[in-house]
Structure formats: C-alpha cells, structure tokens
Image: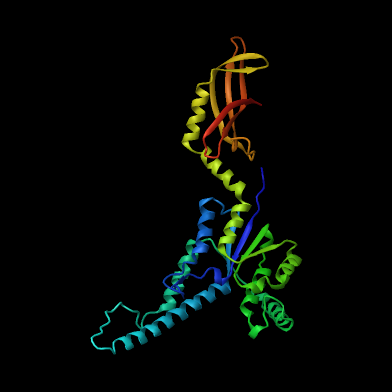
Amino acid sequence: MEAFPKTLVIFDTNQIRETIMGGVDYGSFELSSGFKEISDFISENLLDEYIHLAITDLSINELLKQKIRQFEEDKKNLQGIFARLTSLPNVKIISKNIPDKHFEFEAYLKKQLEDFLGKNTVKILSLHEKMHSDVFIKTIERVLSNKPPFSGDNDRGFKDVIIWETILNFEKINDYDKVIFVSNDQIFTKGGSCFSEFHAKFSKDILIRSSCEMVLQDIKSIYENLIKKIKVVKFTETDYFHDYLDKWLSDLEYINSNWEKYNIVDRKVIEYCRDLKLQNDEESDTSAIIVSKIEIIAHTGKIRKEFTCNLITELDDTMAFIDTYLEEE
C-alpha cells in the first residue's frame, strides 16, 4: 500500500481572524472563511487521519483580545454617533437593543471559544512552562541580533517570536512528515533564517504560506492520489457496487482451469475490495482497478473443485464500469 504523509498546518492570528466591514467579527468565535474552507475540505475528503490543524495559544488569546477591543470600540463609536445624530431636529434613533453595561461580553466570548474548541479538532500549541526561561533568553538574543521573526523596526515582532518559539518547541512535531505555517507576515520569510532554523532543528523543511488558498492547493497536490483512492474505496462499499459484482457472478456459468472447463454450482464474494490500484495512463480510460476476492465451487462432472480467485473491475474517472474479469490465484 502506498504510504501517505502526515501534515500539520499551523495558523497565524492574521489567518484565523474573521472580519465584517473591515472590523474584527465578535459575534461568535468561528474562525476565518479560509480556515473553515480547509477544515471542511479535510472532513469531506476523509483526510482527518492525515492532516491536523493547529493554532498557538497566543494566537487564540490575541484574537480574543482583538474581539473585545473591537466590541468596546464599536460601542463607544456608536454612542457618539447616536449622540450627534439625535442633536439634529426631527431625528429619532430606533433602539437596536445595544448591549448595556450589564452585558458580560468577555464571559460570553469565552463561552463561544469553549464551544468552538469543543466541536472542532483543532490542536492548541502551547509553550510548556518549563520552556519559559529558555525561550525568554532566546527572545533576548533575537532582539539583540535582530534575528527573524523579530524585526528591529520599532521593536516589532515579540508576538511573532513567541509564536515561532511555540512551533519550534512543539513536542510532537516529529510525528508529522510535513509542516505548513500560514501567515501573511513577511517577517517569517525574510532572509530565509526561519527556514534554516527549522531545518537545522528537525532535519526537514517547513512550508510558510501567505494565504489559506495556497495551503488548500498544497493539500490537494500532496493528497491527490489519496483523495482518489478514498473516493474509490467508498464507492466499493456501496450497495450499487455490491449488486453489480453479485449480478456479474450470478451470470457466470463456468470457469477454465488447466485447460479444463468447470461448471459453476456456487459462488460468493469474500472481499469486495481487497486491493486497489490507481491508473495514470493518459492513453487509457481506466482510472482505477479494484481487486475483489471471490470463492467459486465448480465441477467437470467427475471432479468437484473450489477456486479462490481475484475478480478485477476497471473503472473510469466517473466511477463507470469499463470491464470485469476473473484472475485465478
């Protein structure tokens, strides 16, 4: 069987933040449409075993604070707008049930976050407490040497450093063959030092993508064959496929073996899909070959014999049947 890689996709804060009219959406803790598109694609194509999505706890807390700030800013701005508009003659503002001072917005938002984490399998990457002092020392070294993802421009990059160190210190990162970090912050790719640092520590490369769209294309490319294989396997589990094989076998009257013709008296499918081979020959219509295991009881009149055979079924890329034939083991 072909082995498929395990992939970890880590999202920066700027890739999980959902906005409305240019401001941070705080009505729920659902993440960005790009994150959702990737998550849905993984689920719909049954790739959950192979691809895991992750966010650092700093990004989660940063997004929480951004939502709170946006809420408070909107409330303040709206109060000012109402006050100015109602100073005009004949202007009345119809109440929209704006949250009052008794509305515990932060508690509401934390409950939304709890619900989100409860219904999603996203991993939260955290810096273990025992790493804090070591990471602090490394952060100071980055500041002094202006090493990415720290930027010397106005002392920017502290949060980026913590996110990067959280990735570097994720204990289970070697469980994954591929690691993708999605961030539109160019500091992570500046000069290539983050790539070199990651490779030096883990002896493998990290992909840093600037958008969720790019990550989705990576996933489709990496798992193209697996997606096809899963699609075919699911097809072999349908009643439609089972009925087709059962009917084909019921119409089979004899089997040849060692130049002898055996009349079939009984037959049954043992495994509808014991093996599967994808075909990539552009000159052939065959997209997949399904190998099923069958047992046949037949006789020549004097000799009764049991056969274990492979039943080969060829499909095109629309799952239409092209051919079916026996292959004796």
Which quarter of the image is occupied by the C terminus? Answer: top right
Residue 271 vs 70, above or below: the answer is above
x, y percent for residue 60: 54, 72
Which residue is more in the foreground, 91 or 98? 91
Residue 259 vs 307, above or below: the answer is above
x, y percent for residue 251: 50, 21
Name the residue at 62% across, 17% down.
Answer: 256
Which residue is more in the foreground, 24 or 117? 24
Which quarter of the image is occupied by the N terminus? Answer: top right
Name the residue at 52% across, 74% down.
Answer: 63
Residue 185 vs 146, above or below: the answer is above
Q: Quadrant of residue 257?
A: top right
Taking the view exactly as shown, the residue that stands out farthest to the bottom is 87
Q: Quadrant of residue 107?
A: bottom left
Please state if 61 lies on the left or on the right of 284 as rendered. Answer: left
Is residue 127 among the parts visible in the rendering?
Answer: no
x, y percent for residue 85: 31, 86
